[in-house]
Amino acid sequence: MSALTAAYGQKIALKTNALYWATTTPNIGVEASVGKKHTVQLFYGLNPWKQSGGDQSSLRHWTLMPEYRYWFCQSFNGWFIGAHLMGGQFNMGSVDLPFGVFNELEDHRYEGWYAGGGITAGYQWPLSKHWNIEASLGVGYDYIQYDKFRCGECGERLKSDHTNYFGPTKLALSVLYIF
């Protein structure tokens, strides 16, 4: 069997997370079957712009997340568990998030990077030969290095620090096209 034939026989999916789009973040992922019950994926999201409306609010960031998955039934069907790594950069400020989450973002700007990883669990529903829907949740750890500024692009730097975050690291409701 040639390498081309072997590669063609593998299932490969192109995917996007609808919940991530809700934060105005374009995102795309590629997932490939590497066995009957194993897949690997690489996911990327990029939000390069300030929010509209004339204010200075910003959720600019990029993230890259590779992941390994073990499927209880077969690849791209049913329950799975996995392990993910993640990393990226951010520049966020003047944002009033609901429920008082990260309330310092309203009056300050944070710029920095993060790296970490965690575990994932989820389920995929085949809709047709080429289309699936997936729901997944990840929890884990991130090391976050940041600079804190007074609000605005030119605000005074108040401090440079780091923090250790434990908690949700992924929430996805994704649409997949399987080749």
Image (cartoon, grey):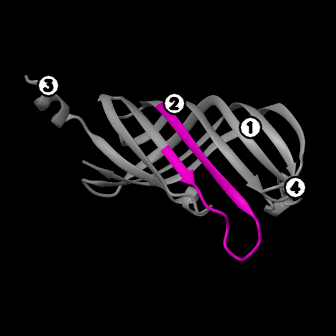
- Image location of residue 104, percent across then percent down: 88, 53
Q: Residue furthest left?
A: 1
Question: Dot 3: what SS?
Answer: helix
Residue position for label 1:
167
Front tag of 2 and 4: 4
**Which residue bears the numbered disc 4?**
103
Dot 1 or dot 2: first in sequence order is: 2
**In the rendered structure, which amino acid carries the disc numbered 4?**
Asn
Alpha carbon distance from label 4 to label 1? 17 Å
Query: What residue would you read off at disc 3?
Result: 3
Total residue callouts: 4
Secondary structure at badge 4 equals helix
Q: Which residues are magenta?
A: 44-67
Q: Are marks 2 and 3 in contact (CB under 8 Å)?
A: no
User: Pointer 4: residues within 10 angstroms few (<14), some, or many (20+)?
Assistant: some
Q: Earlier in the sequence, mark 2 or mark 3?
A: 3
Is residue 75 in view? no
Identify the residue at horizontal 69%, vertical 37% (top origin): 113
Instruction: State how far apart marks 3 and 1 are (Cα).
Output: 41 Å
Query: Residue flagged by tag 2: what amino acid is it?
Result: Gly
| Residue at mark 2 | 82
Name the one closer to the observer, 109 or 27. 109
Q: Is residue 111 magenta?
A: no
Point out the tag, 2 or 4, that comes first from the N-terminus: 2
Residue 175 appears left or right of 22:
left
Q: Are marks 1 and 2 in contact (CB under 8 Å)?
A: no
**Element at badge 1?**
strand
Using residue 118 as the reference point, say whether residue 42 is left or right of it. left
List x then y, in percent, for residue 4.
12, 30
